[in-house]
């Protein structure tokens, strides 16, 4: 995703990885939290579930 974005010419000025997302992206392998977010359950790798990219042309 980031490579495809950069191939279009913008300058990347920020990238944040998120370990909580607002939906159950991996059904049966996630737990909901009190804030309405979902995170991977214990025993699974702590991987980014989403990213926020900031770029300028």
Image (cartoon, grey):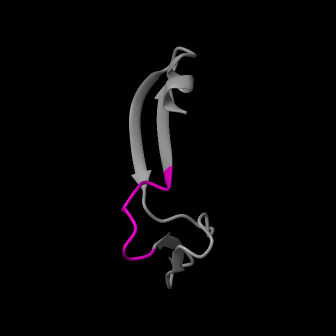
Which residue is at the far bottom?
34
Residue 12, position in %: x, y?
A: 42, 27
Q: Could you tell me which residue is drawn at 55 percent across and 25 percent down? A: 5
| Main SS, magenta residues | loop
Q: Quadrant of the N terminus?
A: top right
Q: Could you tell me which residue is drawn at 36 percent across and 62 percent down? A: 46
The residues colored magenta run 41-50
Residue 49 on the magenta span:
yes
- Say above or below: 53 vs 38: above
Residue 45, position in %: x, y?
A: 37, 62
Residue 9, position in %: x, y?
A: 52, 14
* The quadrant where residue 28 appears: bottom right
Residue 39, position in %: x, y?
A: 47, 71
56 or 35, which is in the foreground?
35
- Say above or below: 11 vs 29: above
- Say above or below: 48 vs 36: above
Residue 53 on the magenta span:
no
Q: How many marks?
A: 0
Q: Could you tell me which residue is drawn at 47 percent across and 36 percent down? A: 54
């Amino acid at each position: 995703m980031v490579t495809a974005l950069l191939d279009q010419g913008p300058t990347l000025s920020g990238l944040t990885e998120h370990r909580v997302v607002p939906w159950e992206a991996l059904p049966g392998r996630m737990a909901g939290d009190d804030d309405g977010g979902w995170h991977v359950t214990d025993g699974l790798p702590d991987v980014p579930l989403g990213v926020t990219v900031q770029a300028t042309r």
